[in-house]
Image: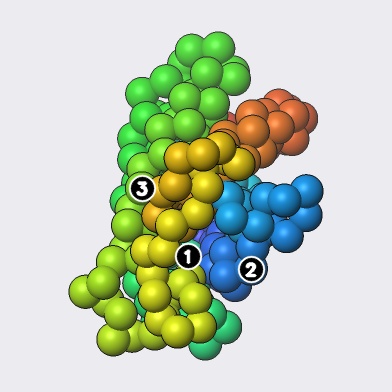
């Protein structure tokens, strides 16, 4: 029971982070001319990988998978309410697959240098998450759910300049690339709290 209760703060943190990110991804980062290549969600979502990696280190991969699954369910419910069914579907699918991949990669590298497992697993997981999320969020087949991240008229693939260049790409491609760059930078920054917290959250016996 103690081990079960010990995991719940990680579950709650995961659900809050994902739900908040699902709301924030609907708002462009309208500063420094980055509105067409970045959303606020890119700044918060990488924290989910930090929570996942700390859970994996502390309790083992089985417990980390439980945290991901329970966090996924809670986040889906919150996201449908706070965001939209379309965002919840895209985010939930991306979150589940990316986090499970993160767990697998982290577990394989856990005995290497302290920074290698969280860094590599976060880079690969963030890339997969971005591809799945933006593909589903802008997929025309799901347009019946809501207008996704497109214009108010419902158009989903209008073109914008890529990083201010002369080359035009669909909005979702521009947002995906911008979000991925920020996710990777934030993921790199998360090595700082990870390195500090692993001295406190020492590995315990894996939860069965």
Residue 70 percent across, percent down from the top left: 43, 66
Q: Which sits in the foreground, 72 or 66?
A: 72
Q: Decide which of tag 1 and tag 2 comes sooner along the chain.
A: 2
C-alpha span from label 1 to label 3: 21 Å
**Dot 1 and dot 2 residues touching (CB under 8 Å):** no
Q: Quadrant of residue 181?
A: top right
Tag 3 residue? 131
- In this rendering, does residue 58 appear at all? no
Q: Decide which of tag 2 and tag 3 comes sooner along the chain.
A: 2
Q: SS of the residue at dot 3?
A: helix
Tag 2 residue? 27
C-alpha span from label 1 to label 2: 23 Å
Tag 1 residue? 71
Is 106 on the left or on the right of 83, as rendered?
left
Disc 1 vs disc 3: which is toward the camera? 3
Is 160 on the left or on the right of 16, as rendered?
left
Q: Which sits in the foreground, 156 or 65?
A: 156
Residue at the image point whose x is 46% and y is 40% from the top: 167
Q: Decide which of tag 1 and tag 3 comes sooner along the chain.
A: 1
Mark 2 crowdedness (10 Å alpha carbons): few <14, some 14-19, many ≥20: some
């Amino acid at each position: 029971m103690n081990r079960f209760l010990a995991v719940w703060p990680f579950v709650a943190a995961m659900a809050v982070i994902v739900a908040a990110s699902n709301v924030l991804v609907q708002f462009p980062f309208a500063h420094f001319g980055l509105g067409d290549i970045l959303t606020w969600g890119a700044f918060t979502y990488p924290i989910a990988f930090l929570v996942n990696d700390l859970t994996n280190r502390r309790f083992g991969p089985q417990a980390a998978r439980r945290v991901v699954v329970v966090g996924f369910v809670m986040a889906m419910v919150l996201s449908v309410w706070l965001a939209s069914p379309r965002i919840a579907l895209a985010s939930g699918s991306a979150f589940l697959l990316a986090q499970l991949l993160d767990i697998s990669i982290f577990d394989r590298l856990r005995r290497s240098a302290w920074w290698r497992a969280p860094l590599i697993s976060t880079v690969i997981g963030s890339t997969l998450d971005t591809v799945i999320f933006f593909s589903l969020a802008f997929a025309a087949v799901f347009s019946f759910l809501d207008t996704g991240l497109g214009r108010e008229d419902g158009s989903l693939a209008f073109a914008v300049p890529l990083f201010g260049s002369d080359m035009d790409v669909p909005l979702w491609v521009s947002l995906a690339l911008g979000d991925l760059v920020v996710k990777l930078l934030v993921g790199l920054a998360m090595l700082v709290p990870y390195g500090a917290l692993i001295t406190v959250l020492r590995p315990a016996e894996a939860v069965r």
